[in-house]
Amino acid sequence: MSATLVRLRGVSKSFQSAGGTTAVLDGVDLVIEAGQKVSLVGPSGSGKSTLLALIAGLLQPDQGTVEFDGMPMGNLSDDKRTALRIKEIGIALQSENLIPFLTIEENVELALEFGGHRSARSTARELLSRLGVAHVARHLPRQVSGGEGQRVVLALAMANKPRLLLADEMVTQLDAFTAGTVVDDIFRQDMAVFFVTHDTALANQADVRLALRHGQVVAG
Ligand SMILES: Nc1ncnc2c1ncn2[C@@H]1O[C@H](COP(=O)(O)OP(=O)(O)OP(=O)(O)O)[C@@H](O)[C@H]1O
Ligand SMILES: [Mg+2]
């Protein structure tokens, strides 16, 4: 038996800019079950990152609802939404969000401490080593390669054992072997994973394959 973790009903989102209004999502319906691995493909600019931000509660829909574990996110206060992101939703976005003046392990430790974790140092080390980046633990973010940075961002996102991992282009800068190892590790975890990719082979590894076309989510 599976439980619904995320449900979107009729979600629409437009952006205003100097050039006018861009309608990006137009009535998206989507369900992610607990533990399910779901891939999302779609052309550049089709709204994939926007959809992740809406599920993360970083953006609010113009219309429709986003529910996490049966709770409409729009009804939560900013504080509650932040707490939900710290504890339950791991986010690995295209733009990295590492603190530039903390070392890699301090960045991961900080995330763990926010999540109420006690032995943050050893857990951070364990996590970095699982993802093959223990050797950069004492580096600053600007001193790591693109592929190492991607793995650090994933380590941060998974630090508090979230129920949902949202990942945008999670292994684009990794060689095929390392990417395979990282993806295997992520897929072995109990958490649901909703990930955006341009890589068809990776998309096909998911339990459910979705695509974004003309503002709507369809079978991929
Ligand atoms: N804050 C914003 N203000 C105005 N327009 C935006 C904003 N964020 C995104 N857009 C526009 O919305 C559209 C969808 O952007 P989004 O980043 O979701 O695409 P994407 O599918 O993730 O693309 P890619 O594969 O290139 O990452 C684009 O046309 C983009 O320019
Ligand atoms: Mg994107």
Image: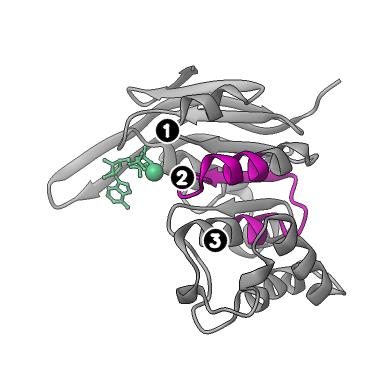
Mark toward the start of the polypeptide (1 vs 3):
3
Q: Residue at x 50, y 43 (%)?
A: 52
Q: Which residue is mark 2?
A: 172
Alpha carbons under labels 2 and 3: distance apart: 11 Å
Residue 175 makes an appearance in the image: yes
Mark toward the start of the polypeptide (2 vs 3):
3
Residue at the extreme left of the image, as rendered: 19
| Stretch in magenta | 154-183
Q: Position of residue 158 (x, y in %)?
A: 70, 54
Secondary structure of the residue carrying numbered label 3:
helix
Q: Badge 3 local density, few (<14 within 10 Å), some, or many (20+)?
A: many
Horizontal side of residue 195 vs 135, given as left or right = left
Q: Which residue is mark 3?
A: 148
Alpha carbons under labels 1 and 2: distance apart: 9 Å
Alpha carbons under labels 1 and 3: distance apart: 20 Å
Whether residue 159 appears in magenta in the rendering, the answer is yes
Whether residue 18 appears in magenta in the rendering, the answer is no
Q: Quadrant of the N terminus?
A: top right
Q: Position of residue 187 (x, y in %)?
A: 71, 37
- Tag 3: residue type? Glu
Q: Residue at x 61, y 29 (%)?
A: 38
- Tag 2: residue type? Thr
Q: Which residue is mark 1?
A: 198
Q: Is mark 1 within 8 Å of ligand 1?
A: yes
